[in-house]
Image: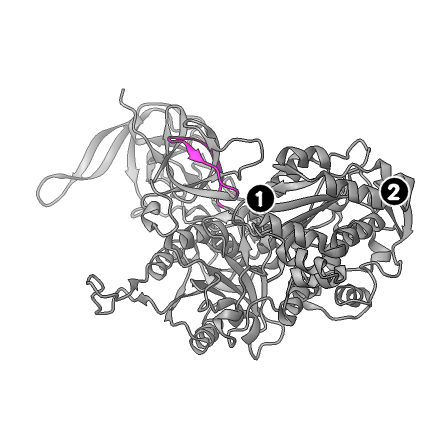
């Protein structure tokens, strides 16, 4: 099996404009085309020691799977060149021989090679080598590493091998190239697979990890460095990764030709138009879009389990990149007319709403009392009339006042209202039983000015006033729907809320309502937790749900269920079947049976690493695509990822502005120490407001299968990823941010 490698480009410019990076893709191309390596990951970071260390610490951690890491850039004497300083503290075994070899090779070609400061060595079981940023120097450096099977032999030793195969072949007088092939005895299929991963699966020009598409630039020349000293070179130089001639080069060249189709219709322009100088200056970034996948990356499910991927071909994107991708790919659904009633809650207005007339339309009272003419009706005794005995359009007889209830119109020739509290009953009419039934006379006890307790016409809303703006959210608290009723709107245009279809995958799952007893000695399966919990969460948020049931681990069942989902819903929400198991079929079905695009297939979060976001074309509906989220099968992972990624997506489809889609973040103090991971972690908590402010109480064990960790949880503490040289643990009472997914709890204070 091929050695896995990662490439890190260190450049302020390239971190802002990925099109400026030519050296990183060149390294990837050369290693893959040697037939001995497969690309594991590729990123671009600015010239920042912490950023460099964070990536390297992640790549070289046990379990990540990187055998070789090569960096390019930042090894010179420039003010911002800090790669050696960032890498050296990580090295556990230094490799001065490799450094000498690289420098000697460079000095044979130019004295400027003396200005490079490479370092090399091992971190855990990973070999790390730093190369200059110059395209020419990078090519020469990789050639040296590949010659005579040198790096293969080093990796064999680092992995615990003896190097015996290479020694025997050299003792027999075989050529170095032959010896190298013996050290790495790759099959033809392994070599083709390694080449395919780079040539098709990874966008080596704009790595998804950067989250940027090619930036517009007026430069037609690219400044590269020789030993990290500047040298200008035509960006269309033959033999560079921008030109045809190899499978990777051809792929990149095809993207440069006008009209060349490629998946995702990314706005990629020719390098000669877009290249930015590869030097250390900051530039404003253009709009960022993570590029579309170029080809099918999923395994072929028709092949035996032995042929499946052992290392995921899907790039591991950050939480921020995943969120950005969702917001960039999704747009509001169509507009529809709906009647104004409580079911409007949760919708987003698709029109401005104006008042059709003054409110109130005439003078009305703001209190219960008696309407008078302030200039003549001072304190005294008056006969009482009501709406039952007097029309408001008729003037009041002399010596009478008009009893009125809050909100009622004033009769003509009145201009003030005396409150009931400022009057005294003088006489009343009797009912059949001799009890007081109706006021006949009352005495007013105070004088009031004109306009007292009176709402003037248009004082609430004037005709033509904007009362609700387009894009306003009609909240479940009722204010917006009340406003629509207030101005007399009976129907309104809103963005359609998405319908969600849910399904669970796995032969081991049992529906909770099926008459199967799994509490016995023999394996009877496990209850499907995900569908009931997700349906409850969705309906609680006001979304219509279509339950597609449990889908067994077969291609036919997956295809049938997804077809039904595409017919019934706007969003498909699946759980399980997203990881590396032989029966994990969702990704192959998405790509191979529906021609869908997987925008990300893994996220650097905990829990929820296999979370997948895709869009699928709808059969018989050209140009129409629907959204699919494939969540992990572990119940806690599924629910956490639902709140982190799915809810914002549903809100975006429903017309929310991107900045309004996510749950609010609040600063909280944690009640227990919390250990940091190499991934951003979402720790389930109960947030209570106490005298010292919001406090987050852990729900206990955070294992991804433990759905009980969400019992009572109204928040997710967002634990930052662990960084090199930083904290391993956040201590009790540390202040962190938490995502508020439910109502805050208040602690009652006793006085």
Furthest-top residue in this view: 751
Task: Check the image and report above or below for 731 versus 354.
Answer: above
Query: Which residue in the rendered view is the most extreme toward the front?
Result: 172
Mark 2: give few (<14), some (14-19) or many (20+) Cα within 10 Å: some
Q: Quick one: 453 or 18, which is closer to the camera?
A: 18
Name the element at disc 2.
Answer: helix
**Which stretch is magenta?**
663-678
List x then y, in percent, for residue 541. 41, 54
Query: Disc 2, disc 1: CB below 8 Å?
Result: no
- The numbered disc on residue 298 is none
Quadrant placement of the N terminus? bottom right
Q: Is residue 550 above or below residue 468?
A: below
Viewer-nearest of labels 2 and 1? 2
Q: Quadrant of the C terminus?
A: top left
**Which residue is the site of mark 1?**
58
Q: Is residue 558 above or below residue 328?
A: below
- Let me know if residue 666 is in the magenta part: yes
Q: Nearer the viewer, residue 568 or 74?
A: 74
Q: Is residue 417 left or right of residue 521?
A: right
Give coordinates of residue 336: x percent, y percent: 52, 65
Q: Which residue is mark 2?
A: 107
Query: Which residue is painted at 42% across and 45% down in the image?
Result: 741
- Which x, y percent locates residue 434? 9, 40
């Amino acid at each position: 099996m091929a050695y896995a490698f990662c490439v890190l480009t260190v450049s302020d410019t390239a971190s802002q404009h990925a099109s400026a990076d030519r050296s990183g893709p060149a390294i990837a191309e050369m290693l893959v085309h040697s037939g001995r390596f497969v690309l594991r990951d590729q990123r671009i970071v600015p010239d920042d020691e912490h950023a460099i260390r964070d990536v390297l610490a992640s790549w070289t951690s046990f379990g990540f799977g990187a055998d070789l890491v090569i960096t390019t850039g930042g090894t010179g004497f420039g003010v911002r060149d800090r790669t050696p300083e960032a890498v050296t503290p990580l090295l556990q075994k230094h490799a001065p021989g490799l450094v000498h070899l690289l420098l000697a090779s460079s000095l044979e070609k130019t004295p400027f090679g003396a200005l490079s400061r490479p370092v090399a060595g091992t971190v855990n079981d990973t070999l790390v080598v730093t190369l200059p940023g110059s395209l020419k120097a990078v090519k020469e450096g990789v050639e040296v590493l590949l010659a005579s099977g040198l790096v293969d032999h080093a990796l064999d030793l680092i992995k615990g091998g003896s190097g015996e195969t290479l020694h025997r072949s050299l003792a027999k007088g075989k050529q170095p190239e032959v010896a190298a092939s013996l050290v790495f005895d790759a099959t033809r299929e392994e070599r083709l697979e390694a080449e395919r991963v780079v040539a098709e699966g990874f966008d080596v020009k704009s790595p998804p990890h950067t989250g940027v598409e090619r930036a517009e630039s007026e430069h037609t020349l690219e400044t590269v460095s020789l030993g990290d000293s500047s040298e200008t070179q035509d960006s269309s130089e033959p033999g560079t990764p921008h030109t045809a001639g190899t499978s990777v080069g051809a792929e990149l060249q095809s993207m440069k030709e006008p009209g060349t189709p490629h998946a995702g219709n990314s706005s990629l322009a020719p390098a000669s138009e877009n290249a930015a100088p590869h030097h250390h200056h900051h530039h404003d970034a253009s709009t960022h879009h993570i590029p579309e996948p170029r080809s099918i990356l999923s395994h072929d499910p028709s092949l035996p389990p032995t042929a499946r991927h052992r290392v995921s071909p899907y790039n591991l994107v950050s939480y921020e990149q995943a969120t950005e991708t969702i917001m960039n790919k999704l747009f509001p659904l169509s507009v529809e007319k709906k009647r104004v009633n409580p079911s409007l809650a949760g919708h987003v207005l698709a029109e401005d709403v104006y008042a059709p007339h003054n409110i109130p339309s005439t003078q009305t009272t703001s209190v219960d009392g008696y309407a008078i003419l302030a200039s003549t009706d001072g304190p005294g005794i008056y006969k009482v009339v009501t709406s039952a005995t007097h029309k408001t359009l008729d003037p009041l007889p002399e010596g009478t006042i008009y009893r009125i209830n809050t909100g009622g119109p004033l009769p003509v020739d009145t201009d003030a209202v005396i409150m009931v509290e400022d009057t005294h009953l003088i006489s009343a009419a009797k009912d059949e039983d001799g009890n007081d039934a109706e006021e006949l006379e009352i005495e007013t006890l105070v004088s009031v000015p004109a306009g007292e307790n009176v709402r003037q016409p248009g004082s609430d809303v004037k005709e033509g006033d904007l009362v609700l703006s387009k894009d306003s959210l009609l909240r479940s608290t009722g204010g917006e729907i009340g406003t629509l009723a207030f101005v007399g709107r009976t129907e309104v245009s809103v963005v359609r809320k998405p319908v969600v279809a849910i399904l669970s995958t796995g032969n081991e799952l049992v529906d909770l309502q099926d008459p199967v007893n799994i509490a016995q000695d023999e394996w009877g399966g496990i209850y499907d937790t995900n569908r009931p919990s997700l349906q409850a969460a969705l309906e609680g948020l006001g979304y219509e749900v279509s339950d597609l049931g449990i889908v067994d681990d077969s291609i036919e069942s997956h295809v049938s269920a997804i077809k039904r989902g595409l017919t019934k819903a706007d969003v498909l929400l699946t759980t399980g079947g997203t990881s590396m198991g032989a029966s994990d079929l969702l990704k192959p079905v998405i790509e191979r049976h529906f021609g869908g695009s997987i925008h990300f297939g893994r996220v650097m979060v905990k829990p929820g690493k296999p979370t997948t976001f895709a869009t699928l074309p709808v059969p018989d509906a050209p140009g129409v695509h629907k959204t699919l989220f494939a969540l992990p099968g572990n119940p806690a992972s599924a629910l956490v990822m639902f709140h982190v990624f799915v809810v914002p997506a549903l809100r975006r489809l429903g017309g929310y502005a991107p900045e309004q889609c996510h749950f609010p973040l609040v600063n909280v103090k944690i009640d227990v120490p919390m250990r940091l991971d190499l991934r951003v972690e979402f720790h389930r908590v109960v947030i209570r407001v106490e005298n010292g402010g919001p406090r987050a109480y852990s729900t206990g064990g955070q294992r991804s299968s433990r759905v009980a960790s969400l019992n009572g949880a109204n928040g997710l503490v967002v634990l930052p990823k662990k960084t090199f040289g930083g904290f391993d643990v956040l201590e009790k009472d540390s202040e962190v941010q938490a995502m508020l997914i439910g109502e805050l709890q208040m602690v009652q204070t006793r006085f």
